[in-house]
Amino acid sequence: MGDGSGRGSGKSSKPEWLQQYDLLGKIGEGTYGLVFLARIKSNANRGKSIAIKKFKLSKDGDGVSPTAIREIMLLREISHENVVLLVNVHINLVDMSLYLAFDYAEHDLYEIIRHHRDKVNQPINQYTVKSLLWQLLNGLNYLHSNWIMHRDLKPSNILVMGDGDEQGVVKIADFGLARIYQAPLKPLSDNGVVVTIWYRSPELLLGTKHYTSAVDMWAVGCIFAELLTLKPLFQGAEVKATQNPFQLDQLDKIFKVLGHPTPEKWPTLVNLPHWQSDVQHIQGRKYESPGLYNVVHLSPKSPAYDLLSKMLEFDPRKRITAAQALEHEYFRVEPLPGINVFATGQPGAVNYPTRPVDTTADFEGTTLLQPSQLVNSGNAVANNMAGSHGMANRSASRPMHMVGMPRMPTQAMGPYNMASQAGMGGGTNPGGLPLQRGVAPQSHQQQQLRRKDPGPGPTGYNPPQQKRRYG
Ligand SMILES: Nc1ncnc2c1ncn2[C@@H]1O[C@H](COP(=O)(O)OP(=O)(O)OP(=O)(O)O)[C@@H](O)[C@H]1O
């Protein structure tokens, strides 16, 4: 293992520590980082798939802040069946890159929802919706119990494991990164990424300084509704990454469905900066609520509607918590939630496609373009994307947690010692529910590139025509 600089690695520009992995390609791109699929080359976990998230650190200032290091060390302590496991951390001081290696998950809710909406044109099976929601809440309850707020929950951050021991198990990704994002990371330069604010809570939109874990429960409510209808519930106009949380259009979309919040129902509303400062737009407009139950097509007396409306409570202090939600009646009536969210064998079961992999990308995220691709397509990557069938054995069996996986020697991480790996204990099951184990999904299909813009679906969901990042 070297110093992380790549020196001594011959012609390869790959840092030495990365040489324990076979890089298979790029699977995603967010505001701050690129995500790669890699496979472990040797040791007991040989063949295991890993998602490596690479961030660019800001070269301004003092490099990696102690706060960021503390946050990352904290993330290494997190261990729960519904939270994606961080298996390795590297800081390459030469090019100021931070690499986080996570357990790989084949699916995410963004793709599952999109597949139902645009491909199979049928709702998600009720068992699957309930199991997804229960496991999401279970992971979130663990994070909140450990004083970790996610702050950026959205469908693409909610992963579901593919083939293997943990098939159909939900994993929350990107948790706790919000604090690291602030500094010292810098957004990927000019990648045209547009931030979705569809899952942002009203208190954040109105500029609260003192938010709580209730912001995550609002996002869960939005995701629950989207699982039911296959459409984002509050689809405000998205914005270029900005420090300003105030988004008038997003608030407008929320009020159109839920009606106007009032100081009677939400007493601290009057203290929120944007409620005060933008009287004309925020307080002046009058909204007629069509009733949330009409929008999500639920009976107002159903347990599902009761739970959803408690997640979408305006006042964060009255909003249901993850622990309370796990105890809700919705999870105690048939169909009961299960460990494998896929429902093969049940009505409405669906085969989900595997993740597209840009097999031409290197760890810099650089795609090697052929001249003809440059001329012909505008989407040159598409020609080089492969589903799992285009690659060797993506479905190698995966142990549940990489307990025995060696951590990187500290010299690869510069001056910081991140050797701590004590667990925080296992998961909780406050609902104490007898989770059903679903049946495995069938074999994967060849699939298309995950497009930046899925285009209008049959439901009329019509995302903006620009390069963007989806929820
Ligand atoms: N552990 C993982 N296994 C498999 N795929 C992952 C994993 N973590 C993230 N991904 C996928 O990589 C893609 C990019 O993720 P990333 O978190 O960088 O971006 P994002 O969530 O879309 O946006 P942002 O990070 O800007 O909030 C997403 O499709 C996500 O589902």
Image (cartoon, rainbow, N blue to C red):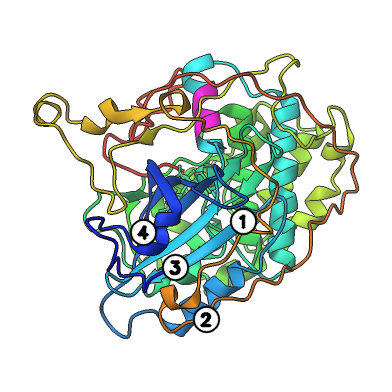
Residue at the (59%, 19%) spot, across then down = 443
* Residues packed near mark 4 inside 10 Å, few (<14), some (14 to 19) or many (20 plus): some
Residue at the (14%, 32%) spot, across then down = 370
Marks 2 and 1, how far apart in space?
Answer: 19 Å
Residue 327 % position (x, y)? 86, 49
Q: Compare residues 397 and 124 and report the one nearer the observer.
A: 397
Marks 4 and 1, how far apart in space?
Answer: 20 Å
Residue 312 % position (x, y)? 65, 49
- Of marks 2 and 1, which one's residue comes earlier in the chain? 1
Q: Quadrant of residue 373?
A: top left
Marks 3 and 2, how far apart in space?
Answer: 11 Å
Q: Amino acid at mark 1?
A: Leu
Residue at the (57%, 74%) spot, across then down = 73
Vertical placement of residue 185 versus 435, above or below: below
Q: Compare residues 253 and 149 and report the one nearer the observer.
A: 149
Q: Amino acid at mark 3?
A: His
In the rendered structure, the answer to whether residue 104 lies left or right of residue 346 reads left
Residue 408 visible from this viewpoint:
yes
Label 1, on which residue? 85
Residue 262 visible from this viewpoint:
no
